[in-house]
Amino acid sequence: MPKKPTIYDIAERLNITAATVSRALNNNPKISKPTRELVIKTAAEMGYEQNKLAQALKSGKSHNVGVIVPRIDNNFFASVIRGIEEELYPKGYHVIICQTHNKEDLEIRNINSLLNAQVDGILMSISNAKIEEKEGFKNLLKKSIPLIFFDRKRDIQDVSTVTIDDFRGAYESTQHLINQGCKRIAHLSNDRLFLIYKNRYLGYKQAIIDNGLEFDENLVIEIESKISEGKRITKELLALENPADGIFSSSDFTALGAIEEIKSQGLKIPENIAVVGFSNEPFTKFMELSITTVDQSPVEMGRIAAQVFLEEITNSKKVKSKKEVILSPELIVRKSSMKLENKFI
Amino acid sequence: MPKKPTIYDIAERLNITAATVSRALNNNPKISKPTRELVIKTAAEMGYEQNKLAQALKSGKSHNVGVIVPRIDNNFFASVIRGIEEELYPKGYHVIICQTHNKEDLEIRNINSLLNAQVDGILMSISNAKIEEKEGFKNLLKKSIPLIFFDRKRDIQDVSTVTIDDFRGAYESTQHLINQGCKRIAHLSNDRLFLIYKNRYLGYKQAIIDNGLEFDENLVIEIESKISEGKRITKELLALENPADGIFSSSDFTALGAIEEIKSQGLKIPENIAVVGFSNEPFTKFMELSITTVDQSPVEMGRIAAQVFLEEITNSKKVKSKKEVILSPELIVRKSSMKLENKFI
DNA sequence: CTGTTAGCGCATTCAA
DNA sequence: TTGAATGCGCTAACAG
């Protein structure tokens, strides 16, 4: 394995100095055309490749960004990461992945570890419901590197965010269920310290109220985003004396659990109970009883988050500024909520 | 934003030298306990954090590994990456993600770009059917860093691989279809320059022959792993004068396309045609007509690939050696191939 | 046990 | 336009 040539090796071969080589390779204007061309040609011959580590150490820019998500094998997060990578790779950035598994301490360790690695920015979907109270996070805020939240965010000064309009997504979903004739709609929520769940809850509530239906706090339940949890809680909901005739779930997984439970009890979907999920996970489309859901355009979300990062890194001279991007949700009506008589609504 | 303290800052404060600080921080034995403790305490007070870039430049180890996949928003690859990340993070490595979108030239650029970034190893599932012929790849082979192929591999000297036993997975799938009574089984294949597809084809063929059925090359079709392609080709298959009564697909996506087409023609699954896919994508399980498929334990595959990397990085003094890990596939029988009379086979 | 020195590979300032 | 010198932050060899 031959040692990698450095700019010194090529300088020596050409009887010039490393500085000149560096300039030639970096399109520095202060260099003669013949020299530049000679250097570039020789570099190619010698199989020279820039050592980005050295460059990074010198410049203070690693050209790496860290992305922190609960887990990557989840279509939503994977798609966001896809968008981020696609946007950043052409600009010369690499994407470093960290998973939190929803462990609060692991998230903080991820942050520190990325900071040590000198990432130029961090894009994350948080796992700590009150992340702003953690020491490790405060530490991150003090740095001058861009920090961007996507999807699961908290409102924190100087931290830009990219989300969809969760309130609207929830409002439209609930309105859709009401249009289908539902009168008593349950809401499978999640920890509302996370703004996305809070906003979905608020959108749901507002739609109920705006339509003159009775808002019943007992029909709102906070559970983890798991199929089994959806099942478990739906069993309870169905056992109520006055059961729901519609379910708006803040997660496709709990919606799926709900559907399984409803079917196992011999009830019809959507006739007896209509169901709407959230996120447009692939399985919601492929199922025989396809699930109505809200699309969050995750790839786009990733792209935008990456763009916000690029803007912030560019305008870094200016004062820190916060940018909030809110994408439009798209309600995708499928069989789980489409009652026959209303097929075209 | 206060400037980050370096070991010099803490050395100055303590009236000692940076070398001593470095030693204290790195658990070097040649240092007195009081000094070490004082340094550690002071470092903590000053909010010191190690700059891994400098360490990397000095040591030649970035503690980053590159992972190259066609795309990340695909459950199989996302799960492999999950496994890799989980295995490597505790060892102090970060995972850098690159996507090829199945573009051969992009894959080569990804390799170069990761090499520039001084990654300590590359784990990849290839997009170039004959990657060994590409200049950029030969270049990578010359380096002394570990290279590991997972899933989509090529047999190349010195390159370790982690795959499942595709031959066996295919053989068992086909045998299963035969057990269900299928006599004329089609195979939706893919570019067989990729060993995984070649082996699946060979396993299929062997099962046909071993069972004394007629092997008909016309029933083997190479297509891209897309739902639409599965649909298109199934339409052709069904139009044959002597159509198939079973389909073994090397991809869940083409299997899904096949199922959609079969159903749209009013045929029954599995009664008229039984279908088996490959990969155990989540949707195969959630569908009403769940799809029989072969599980590749992707998270495990990622973990193993990471372990192979760690072994190679550790034994780097020795000669380069090639390791081949072959995981067991697991046939998961579901409705798409389970004929009623054979429910328990 | 601790200090001194040097260098990883590069880009940039100051001279010439 | 080019060369010489310096430092990014850290570690390791060599002294002492």
Image (cartoon, coloured by chain):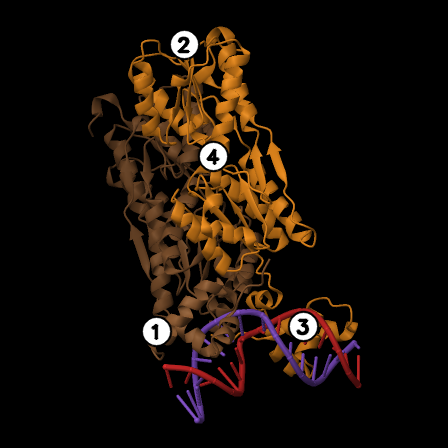
Chain colours: A brown, B orange, C purple, D red
Q: Is residue A245 visible?
A: no
Say which element carries label 1. loop
In the displayed structure, D1 sits above or below B91; it is below
Can you give x and y, in whole percent of width and height, for residue A100 in the image? 53, 49
Chain letter behind tag 4: B
Which quarter of the figure has residue A169?
Answer: top left
Per the image, the residue denoted by label 4 is B194
Question: Could you give the CA–CA distance between mark 2 and mark 1, rounded to whole angstroms?
Answer: 68 Å
Question: Which of the two discs, 4 and 2, sits closer to the camera?
Answer: 4
Q: CA distance from mark 2 to mark 3?
A: 72 Å
- The chain carrying label 2 is B
Observer-nearest of B302 and A72: B302
For badge 2, the amino acid type reads Glu
* Element type at mark 4: loop
Front disc: 4 or 3: 4
Q: Secondary structure at mark 3?
A: helix
- What residue sits right under mark 2 in the picture? B271
Q: What residue is drawn where x is 46% and y is 15%? A: B337
Q: Earlier in the sequence, mark 4 or mark 3?
A: 3
Q: Give the number of the disc on residue A67.
A: none
| Residue type pointed to by label 4 | Phe
Tell me the SS state at disc 2.
loop
Residue B22: give its label.
Answer: 3
Q: Residue at x 38, y 34 (%)?
A: A282
Q: Which of the chains bears the disc numbered 3?
A: B
Disc 1 crowd, CA 10 A, few/some/many (<14, 14-19, 20+) = few
Labelled pair 2, 3 in contact (Cβ < 8 Å): no
Any mark on residue A318, and which? Answer: 1
Residue occupying image coordinates x 35% and y 25%: B230
